[in-house]
Image: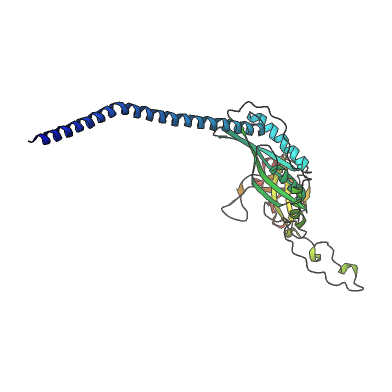
């Protein structure tokens, strides 16, 4: 090998050894630095996540406190009493008669972090006042929800029957807050309430009543006996077949009989002791008995009349013309013992 070749080989070998040494030194020095950098990045990421969770926790805590200020109470009993008071006050503010409304407690139903309670509300009132009630409930600042809203025609002309559930929550555990009496931002005199006046003006819930035919022209000199003897449509005298028992319900523990007059398009109310169908209402019977009109089915309610020494029954859904005489075995014990 020539001298120049040996020098070139030596130089190349030295360069290779120098590069190898640099790589060894770099890996020995930079590897720990890279590990430290990765640990710093992971620590920063974990710290940022902790700060984000901390901010979310405080934001959720503020939100829960704001919701707790709108609840009716910390305990179920306290919230039930307060919500019932607010509901009654809302009925009165709506110009409704709170005696015409029933309020039945609902719940409690256990949820995650809370319990749901409320009231099942049903009652009759004028359409304008019922719209007032729904408006005030919708604008109420208290924590609540109205569900199952149902509107139907009432028993009296111009009235509607409203049904709904007024629900609220009690938080568990409840944060320590100081509650105040909340007041809605809007009232019945607010412009937003007047936007609902067309509902009342158009009387959207009034049932359709077919216009009766025009009465025949009166004949001069006709005898009074030739004139109609009733104020029902077309001069017809309402018979028992046009009077139908539509409801046998209880209100405040007092049973009632609701009879629908198909001719006059109105519902009449009777109570035990009143005169009905040529007799006296002796009892409203809620025993499940075989239906007299349909075999294989049960009738769950009927009104029992005393006519002389006998008892007669009219099942719910039947007309007064369908009354039937009860046999001795069908008479309730409370009436059988009555002289």
Q: Residue at x 67, y 29 (%)?
A: 78
Q: Quadrant of the N terminus?
A: top left
- Where is residue 59, by image quadrant? top right
Measured from the top left, where is residue 205 in percent x and y?
72, 55
Measured from the top left, where is residue 289 in percent x and y?
61, 48
Query: What is the image's colouring?
Result: rainbow
Residue lying at the far front of the rendered structure: 3
Q: Nearer the viewer, residue 24 or 194?
A: 24
Measured from the top left, where is residue 133 in percent x and y?
73, 44
What is the number of callouts on the image? 0
Q: Residue at x 78, y 47 (%)?
A: 274
Q: Nearer the viewer, residue 155 or 2?
A: 2
Q: Is residue 31 above or below residue 143?
A: above
- Where is residue 56, by image quadrant? top right
Residue lying at the far left of the rendered structure: 1
Q: Nearer the viewer, residue 216 or 123?
A: 123
Measured from the top left, where is residue 293 in percent x and y?
62, 56
Residue 326 visible within the image: no
Residue 152 visible within the image: yes
- Where is residue 94, by image quadrant? top right
Left or right side of 47 for 238: right
Residue lying at the far bottom of the rendered structure: 220
Residue lying at the far right of the rendered structure: 221
Q: Nearer the viewer, residue 158 or 300?
A: 158
Q: Quadrant of the C terminus?
A: top right
């Amino acid at each position: 090998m020539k001298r120049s070749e040996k020098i070139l080989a030596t130089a190349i070998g030295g360069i290779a050894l120098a590069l190898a040494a640099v790589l060894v030194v770099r890996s020995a020095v930079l590897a720990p630095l890279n590990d430290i950098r990765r640990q710093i990045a992971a620590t920063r990421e974990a710290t940022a996540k902790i700060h984000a969770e901390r901010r979310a926790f405080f934001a959720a805590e503020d939100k829960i406190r704001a919701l707790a200020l709108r609840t009716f109470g910390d305990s179920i009993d306290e919230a039930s009493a307060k919500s019932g008071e607010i509901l009654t006050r809302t009925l009165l503010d709506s110009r409704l008669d709170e005696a015409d409304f029933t309020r039945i407690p609902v719940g409690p139903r256990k949820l995650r972090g809370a319990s749901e309670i409320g009231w099942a509300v049903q009652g009759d009132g004028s359409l304008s006042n019922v719209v007032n009630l729904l408006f005030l409930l919708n604008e109420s600042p208290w924590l609540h929800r109205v569900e199952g809203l149902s509107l139907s025609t009432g028993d009296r002309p111009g009235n509607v029957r409203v049904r709904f559930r007024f629900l609220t929550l009690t938080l568990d555990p409840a944060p320590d807050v100081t509650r105040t009496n909340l007041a809605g931002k809007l009232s019945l005199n607010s412009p937003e309430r007047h936007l609902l006046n067309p509902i009342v003006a158009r009387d959207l819930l009034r049932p359709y009543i077919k216009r009766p035919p025009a009465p025949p022209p009166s004949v001069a000199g006709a005898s009074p006996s030739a004139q109609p003897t009733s104020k029902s449509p077309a001069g017809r005298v309402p018979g028992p077949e046009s009077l139908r028992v539509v409801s046998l319900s209880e209100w405040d523990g007092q049973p009632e009989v609701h009879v629908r007059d198909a001719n006059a398009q109105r519902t009449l109310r009777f109570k035990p002791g009143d005169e009905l169908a040529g007799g006296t209402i002796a009892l409203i019977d809620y025993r499940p008995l075989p239906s007299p009109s349909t075999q294989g089915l049960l009738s769950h309610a009927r009104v029992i009349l005393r006519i002389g020494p006998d008892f007669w029954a009219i099942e719910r859904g039947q007309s007064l013309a369908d009354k039937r005489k009860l046999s001795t075995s069908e008479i309730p014990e409370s009436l059988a013992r009555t002289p």
